[in-house]
Each structure stands twice: as structure tokens, then as C-alpha cells.
Image (cartoon, rainbow, N blue to C red):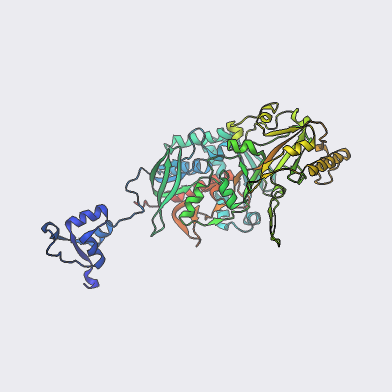
Amino acid sequence: MSSGEKEEKRISRRDFVRGAAVGAAGVAAASVLTGCAQEAPASTPEVIKETVEVPVEVIKEVEVKPWLPEKWDYEADVVAVGFGAAGSAVAIEAADAGADVLLLEKMPEGLDGGNFGVCGGLLLSPATSATWVQELTFGKVDAEIVRLSDETEKNLLEWLESLGLTVDLITQYPGITFGWVAEKGTGLFAAFKEQVKQRGVNVLYETSGKELIQDPVTGEILGVKAESKGQILNIKARKGVVLTTGGYESNSEMLNDLNHPGVYIASVGSPGNTGDGLKMAIKAGARLSHIGMDVEWWSFAYRLPSQLYKTGITGTFPSNSYIFANKAGKRFMDQKTSLVHTKTPLQALHFEGELTLPPPPVSEYPNIPFFAVFDDKVIKSGPLSTLGTTGWNDVYKIYEWSADNSVELNNGWIVKADTVEELAAKMTAVDEFGRSVGVDSAGLVDTINKFNQDCASGIDSQFKRASNALAPLDTPPYYAIEMCLSAIYTIGGLKYNANAQVLNYDNKPIPRLYMVGMVGSCGIVLPFGGIVESFTFGRVAAKNAVSLEPWG
């Protein structure tokens, strides 16, 4: 058969019907593969011999597309995965543009909102000149993102006020304005949740995104495969999917893979932030950007209760008679240093590696594990941890420390001894290789003696701790508790453009896929502020997704 005669093909009527249902088998398959009709052999039953002319276009319509589910459990114009600051902005903007919106939220209702539900409500609105942002991000942010962010931020306050929110603005530095939304924490998220509810947006709780449904030919994202209470759901996104799943600070495996191998980092953010959006997008061909050092620290935390309750139980020492000591019994930093929202490399994470011959080679964090060591003045001054207003444990009160520290002593989290030597013998922890590690007794005795001498002189000869924060460890019994680092969120992840489209490794958009918020973010630090960036690009992503023609 010539190429000009391929306009129409003959297939068996029965095989045409079968092909529409199960993928065109038998005579129909042979006809399609050879490109021309074939006569049925004499042994073929009469009912199958009958043929009918079918246009090529119809045959294409019945071709099997195994990437498409047999049925859709839900569908909407725009599907956003994650219900926090970014998901709220997407839902509100898309609904106001007339789109049908579906939100998927991993956590149960009442624990929704992600980190947005436990934040302080700070808006940072800098004068986002291209030069300023490029300096902050080492040239990693596209100038068009900066321009668009600056343009969108100009009406941000107006947008917030239209939602019934008030913002107290405080200009503290030239070109940088800090604003505090009146509501904070769960109250702040509740205001947005109410706006989403008023727009009739459907929210599926306890539903986590597992995989993007993608056309392997065009690369288009057609929907989301999600899991809800043990059931797999196929969710169709007629126009686009927006990933608003937050970071991966609550996924120890990913933190070890992507940031600090062998280091336990407690998350003070949502336990639902486990990198789901990253994993989904990577499988669909997404490019990663500036992952590696991008953990935004919060404060020091207590390791054992943090691991037990799966949230950062942070520490506050009610007296200055304490130090941090590593396994050699040595100090390694000024313990009064605040880590909150810092990006500075930490002394605790100092790493030593050397290929020595003969083996074994050196490969360790000499300052991990580490302990807070203190005396009786501290233990009698008040609880070692108090609840605040920011962070998962503070807001939801997962664990409340006892007022006199007695419960924590009985739990074995705090160890106690009459002498420093006896205390060192009780200070054991698990290192980055899973081995039991003790603390050098002589080293700890020497360290405390040196620290007490510095307290007497009023000068910290090692780390320049402020003189008014120096108090000797001289009142037995002595105590110790294992510490760890905590993070509020991760920064970096998916690379995106000014349209909030997720990019692949050719720097081209993955069709119908968008991202907003900490699942990507655009800087090693946050040049636009986390909440502002989520609001800004949430609205951008929604507008662009809504403008698309439905794929089916």
C-alpha cells in the first residue's frame, strides 16, 4: 500500500470495539502495524470477516495511553498540593479568577497550615532592586523574577487588606520594611483558611501527593496521584498543578542526603514537610537549585525528647552557669549565640576529614554529639524549656517541660552527678555512625576549671562570651543533657522562572507544572521573605495556570 493510500484503514468491527476497550488486539493490531488492510484467513469465523472503513484519526483516539488512569476520582481546573501560605494564595487567586480549585493537604484538619500556621507573621518587603537581590543570592535569581516580584509586591498590602488583614509596617533600615500581620500563628492561617472556605474551594485533608501524572510524549502534567487514608486517588488537573508542599526539614533522610550527612537536625516546623513536592517533581524531570547548605536554623534543641516527639523541643537556660561540651569535653562556641534565622556555618557542624595512610582515615564531626553542662543554680532557676508562640511544639504544645525539671530527670534526658568526673562517666550519646560515644572526663574537668577562671576574670578567653553572661559552674550537683540543632525550614529545591513554572534540566518549563514557596524558593537566603514570596508567586502561579486551555 502506498503512503497516499494510508488515509483510511480497514479493521474488524468486533476488533475495533475491543481495541477501544483494551488496546486494539488481533486483526486490528495487525492492520495498524502494517499500515494496510489484510484479508481474513478462510478459517476466520464469518462474524470477524466483516470489515469497516475507519479514519486514522479515530484509530488514534482509541490508542492506549497507559499513563492515564482508568478513572479520575476528583478533578478541578487547578490542583494545589499543600495548604499553607502558598496554597492559600493559589486557591484564593485562582478561585477569584473563576477557576475550580482543589487543595490537597497531607495533615489532618486542625494541624493544617504547614509552617505558615506556626509562624510569627513577619512580612519582609525590601526594595528589591536586581543588584540587591543578586548580591544576596550570588547571581542565582533571574532578573525577571526580581522585576515581577517587585511589581507584585506593590499591591500586596492592598491585597491583604481586601482579605480583612491588617499589617503594622515598621521601616527599620533604608530600603527594607518589616511588617507584622496582626494575627500570628494559627490565627494568621485561620484568616486565610476562612477566605478559602468562603470561595467554596474543596480541601482534601489527610491526602498527600505521591506522584505527578505526566504525558510522557508532551511532558504535560495532567494530574496528581495521591494517597488518602490508605487509598490511592487519581486527581485530574484540567489546567495545571501547583506544588505548595513546603520544604523537607521534617525528613531526616533527605536532610542527611542533601545537607548534612550523619547529623540529626530537629524540625520546629510542620511534620508534614517531608519533601513530597520535591520527590514528585524530580520524577517528572524537574531541576534542583541551591540545595546543600540551605537549612535555616532556629535554635538549640534537646535531642532525646525531640526525637521521641518528632518535633524540636528547644532549650532556654534560666541561668548563665552552663556551657556546651563536645565528646572531648571541650567547649567549641559561645553558647549564648542565637541561631534563629541564621545561615552562617556553625561551629557544631565543623567537619574533619583526612585520608590517612595507613588507615583508618579521619571522618567525623568532632563537636557532635554535644551536651549542655550546668550546675544546680540552673536546675533550680526554672524549666530548661518554655513554650513560645512560634514553632510546632510551641503552638500545638506537643510536649510541655516540667516546671522544676523533675520529669526530665526521671526520664533520663538529664543526667546528674555530684562531681564533674562522675557526670562525664554518665554522659553517653550515639554518634553519626550509630556508635555509643562517651565524654572525656579529664577534658571536661579541665574545660570547666578554665571556664570558671574566665568567669572570675570577667573575660571569656576562648569565645568572647559577654561578661554579663558569664557565671561559673561551681554549685554541685552537676547536670548534663544532650543537645542538637533545630531548623525552621529548608531553602532551595525546585528551580522555577518568573511565571512560577517548574523548570527541567534544559531550563525549559515542564508544561502545566508550577511551584510556590519553600518547595523551591529563589535564594540561599530569602531575599523576598518567606511569606511575601509565597503570597507573590502564589498569585502569579494561579493566574498563569488559570489562563491555560484545559487539556481534556
Q: Quadrant of the N terminus?
A: bottom left
Look at the image and tell me whether residue 153 can be seen.
no
Q: Is residue 21 above or below residue 52?
A: above
On the image, which quarter does residue 310 sit in? top right
Which residue is at a point 45% across and 47% down the rendered structure image?
A: 210
- Judge by depth and name the residue closer to the eye, 169 or 452: 452
At 45% across and 51% down in the image, what residue appears? Answer: 544
Residue 444 percent coordinates (x, y): 79, 42
On the rendered structure, is 69 left or right of 150? left
Q: Please say if 107 is above or below 65.
A: above
Question: Of 47 and 514, which appears nearest the observer?
Answer: 47
421 with respect to 513 (left or right): right
Give the quarter of the image for residue 469. Answer: top right
Q: Farthest residue toward the front?
A: 358
| Residue 394 position within the rendered picture, expressed as x and y whole percent measured from the top left | 61, 33
Circle count? 0
Relative depth, front residue between 20 and 482 = 482
Q: Is residue 265 visible?
A: yes
Residue 153 in the image: above or below residue 43: above
| 109 left or right, relative to 297 | left
Residue occupying the far bottom of the picture: 2
Left or right for 316, reference 37:
right
Image x and y of residue 420, in percent: 79, 37
Report x, y in % for residue 519.
Answer: 53, 48
